[in-house]
Image: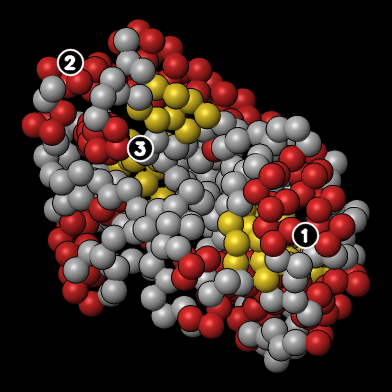
Amino acid sequence: MNLLIKKGPALWRRAKKIIPGGSQLLSKRSEMFLPGGWPSYYKKAKGIEVWDLDGNKYEDFSLMGVGSCVLGYADPDVNRAVKMAADLGSMSTLNSPEEVELAEILCKLHPWANMARFARTGGEAMSIAVRIARAYTGRDKIAFCGYHGWHDWYLAANLADKKNLDGHLLPGLDPAGVPRGLKGTAFPFHYNDIAALEKIAAANKDIGVIVMETLRHTEPKNDFIKKVAQIAKKIGAVLIFDEISIGWRLNVGGAHLLYGVNPDIAVFAKAMSNGYPMAAVIGRKGVMDAAQKTFISSTYWTEAVGPVAALATIKKMQKKHVPEHLGKIGERIGKGWKAVAEKHGLDITVVGPNPLITFSFNPPAGGGKINQALKTLFIQEMLKRGYLAALSVYVSYAHKENHVKSYLKAVDEVFGIIKRSIENKTTSNLLEGPIAHSGFKRLT
């Protein structure tokens, strides 16, 4: 495609002068994709198609709203329900009845849970869950595994060692502004490393909360999740499963249901409402009742659009068997990457789960810097072919077999370019701008 991309990069330059970091979300920074050349802003999004400010149309084989649009952009069934709610009035002095229906559905899908509280974003929902857990146990210290957002309780881990969070999705997160008094309250352990959690529990008798992502890209081994639950029970800690990213993708509800291990609290956001702000904290009654011992309250947690969107999304996921579709399409993409890479003699690693299918380059030498250059070149060349691309695809119900076929044809061309660039050591020369960022960095 002969693309003219001017308005987006120009607006991004303006944004960085007036918005710290340029955007509200690190994962949407242009520097994370293609510095200087990323479209940056959209005018319209429908299905998997996105139109930028210059009128260029792309198919999204990247993050699909950073995992929020599991049905596809502007899903007609969800939009219809939301528009009706907006016309009836999305806010009132009285409460939205849909939040009661949503609480009942969430507890029905998760029979171990008896109560629910709502918020509108994943990060704040995690903070609510941690606050409730601390209120219940009366203990401050937390052991955690995985990425859980931007709030103080989590970033406090980097007060003790600025590299504590590097293995939990985003390296380089600075705890500036986090009270020093929180040092020594948050202790990280890695997925499938039960010995590390046992060590934390032995050294800190006052661990009151254990938090973990049920699953990201690594399957649990040796009953890892079950053993975490056993440790939580043994030390009297509240077990919180963060289902913000993985929830609703492997099944309708939390991924923990597939492993037969129930937490005390589970947290959902992203995919549960298909792009409309909504988050839920569900849990056992005895634990959740502790919310009434502390102060957790916010006006916009009571608006109607979030619950209405979540109800419409969940019902459609059930009716259309959406998780099965996500798995099928993700598997097709992963196998396609492997086949095309093998064709070109390109060394890559593909990891699941299929609805969050991901690959990485394994060049013969050079480490992370070369990997980032190859990633940037991949994004650059896929953009020229009409794709918003990354090394991960957050599969949606709107991704169909014909889309995947065309996408893999483009990947075939680009993998050929990348292989030749490795052989000829010309990767940097082919880049039309700087290498993409790999973690948190200041932009100005």
Task: Residue 301: name its quadrant.
Answer: bottom right
Mark 2–mark 3 CB contact (< 8 Å): no
Q: Amino acid at mark 1?
A: Leu
Q: Residue shown at 81%/75% (left/top)?
A: 137
Q: Residue shown at 41%/62% (left/top)?
A: 162
N-terminal-most mark, 3 or 1: 1
Where does the N terminus fall, quadrant-wise?
top left
Q: Which residue is mark 1?
A: 239
Q: Tell me, for residue 423, which label it has, or none.
A: 2
- Residue 174 location, x and y as percent? 38, 67
**Residues at marks 2 and 1, CA–CA distance in whole angstroms:** 49 Å
* Eye-nearest disc, 2 or 3: 2
Left-right relation of 384 to 144? left
Q: Which residue is mark 3?
A: 389
Q: Residue shown at 85%/65% (left/top)?
A: 236
N-terminal-most mark, 2 or 1: 1
**Outermost residue, left direction?**
429
Does the rendering let one see residue 310? no
Mark 3 burial class by Cα count in 10 Å: few <14, some 14-19, many 20+: many
Tell which of 285 and 84 is nearer to you: 285
Left-right relation of 177 to 413? right
Task: Residue 21: name its quadrant.
Answer: bottom left
Task: Residue 443: name its quadrant.
Answer: bottom left
